[in-house]
Amino acid sequence: MDSHAPASAARDYAAQYPDPIDVPSGATVRVERPDEENPSWWWCVAEDGRAGWVPATILDRAPTARASARVQRPYSARELSVTRGEPLAILEEFAGWLFVRNMTGARGWVPASHIERRDAKSPGTHEPSRPWTG
């Protein structure tokens, strides 16, 4: 696939949000609330009304509920639906989620619990080198 960490889907995952927040670097977002299970993620709303979970680390200040912040880099909360055994490349990791690319080039976030890393030396195999648990 490429030099990114090879992986495969350990089980099926269906994307939960059809049209999530997708903003350029420097965009202002309204910060709503932290995720109750993982406060590293904050529910934010873009100026166009689209919303989604945003990593606190890409906001220009420590998030505060009902405040505004700017994103420090382009960001999309798009999730990727995957099928068990599907080959993937891990592009980014954050707080229990992996941003991956599939063989068709589609990109999105998938829970780390649904991904198995593969040995980079054997990219043709789909057997996991070890389970990825985040």
Image: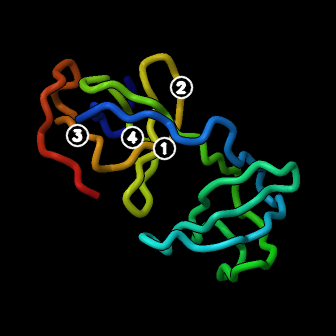
Say the numbered circle drawn on residue 90: 4
Q: CA distance from mark 3 to mark 1?
A: 14 Å
Q: Earlier in the sequence, mark 2 or mark 4?
A: 4
Please name the residue that numbered disc 3 is placed on. 116
Q: Amino acid at mark 2?
A: Ala
Q: Quadrant of residue 17?
A: top right
Say the numbered circle drawn on residue 106: 2
Q: Amino acid at mark 1?
A: Trp
Q: CA distance from mark 4 to mark 1?
A: 10 Å
Residue drawn at (32%, 40%) of the image: 5
Q: Quadrant of the N terminus?
A: top left
- Within 10 Å of the Cα at label 4, are there few (<14), some (14-19), or many (20+) other Cα atoms? many
Question: Do the residues under discs 3 and 4 have CB atoms within 8 angstroms?
Answer: no
Q: Quadrant of the C terminus?
A: bottom left
Please name the residue that numbered disc 1 is placed on. 109
Decide which of 48, 115 is in the foreground and name it: 48
Residue 95: x and y in percent read: 41, 63
- Within 10 Å of the Cα at label 3, are there few (<14), some (14-19), or many (20+) other Cα atoms? many
Residue 127: x and y in percent read: 12, 28
Q: Earlier in the sequence, mark 3 or mark 2?
A: 2
Q: CA distance from mark 3 to mark 2?
A: 18 Å
Residue drawn at (16%, 46%) of the image: 131
Q: Earlier in the sequence, mark 3 or mark 1?
A: 1
